[in-house]
Image: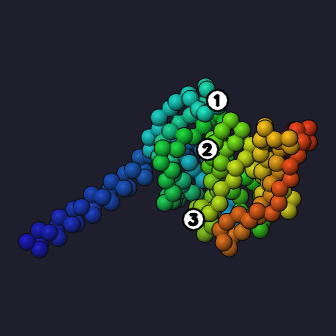
Amino acid sequence: MLKRLFFILVFLFTYLHLQTYSYATVINIPEKSRVLLKVKDTKGIDYNVYFFAPEETKTDYYLCSTGDEVFVGNYSFLIQKLGEKEIKTTSIILKDYPYNQTQKTVFPIRNKSELYPDIVMVSNQLDCNTKVGYLYYVDNEKLISVQSTLSYTLPPRFNEKNELETMNYYNMEELPWVLSTYSLDLKSNSLKFINKKSLSFEEGQKIKSNW
């Protein structure tokens, strides 16, 4: 009885191992991924980050913008150190995420400083003027989720002081544009609010044209 159980366990282990191996080898991740992001990690090392779903459903509807090319699926990230063949899976899965390819709702935020990593942003539409973004970065060959989100109208960027800036537009306000500034705290793995400045429509448009 114990001998039979042993062979069953060996068979199951071998079967599952082969299934996992075949899945990894049959699917060409670089070819099948929806987005490829090239980012640097906390040590300045370059990585490829693949945004991938085993299955997708295509739709042309999106909030406030009909006709956008949108793909819905259970997306995950895979990472690859530049120059190496191995592609590593991560534990992050975004279930039923609507990736808007037209508006590129998954994108990198580049940082010129070696003190901070680049950011991978995954965003959703809140209303016709505002998206909310979830932030990730690579550290020690792992993808880390920042414990904060950013709302924005114009995509977030790093300024010369290595601070994250966002521009939001509130059309019912007398000063409709708001420029907000945050710092990325890698120790607490969160964003720290620094300040915000309300701007007139004309002031905001000038900044927007150079964003």
Residue 168's disc number: none
Describe the element under mark 1 as helix, strand or loop: loop
Earlier in the chain: of badge 1 and badge 2, it is 1
Residue 65's disc number: 1
Tell me the kind of residue under disc 3: Lys
Figure check: 94 above or below 104:
below
Describe the element under mark 2 as helix, strand or loop: strand
Tell me the kind of residue under disc 2: Asn
The quadrant of the image that shows the N terminus is bottom left
- Farthest residue in the top direction? 67
Q: Where is residue 13 in the image (x, y as percent from the top left)?
A: 27, 63
Earlier in the chain: of badge 2 and badge 3, it is 2
Give the number of marks: 3
Along the viewing direction, whichever of 84 and 55 lies nearer the viewer: 55
Q: Position of residue 140 (x, y in %)?
A: 60, 69
Left or right? Give the position of 57 relative to 5.
right
Tell me the kind of residue under disc 1: Ser
Q: Name the residue under label 3.
A: 142
Earlier in the chain: of badge 3 and badge 1, it is 1
The quadrant of the image that shows the C terminus is top right
Residue 124's disc number: 2
Left or right? Give the position of 7 relative to 21.
left
Q: What residue is at 27 percent from the left and 61 percent from the top? A: 14
Nearer to us of marks 3 and 1 is: 1
> Could you give the CA–CA distance between mark 2 and mark 3, rounded to whole angstroms?
23 Å
Q: What residue is at 74 percent from the left and 65 percent from the top? A: 192
Q: Position of residue 176 (x, y in %)?
A: 83, 42
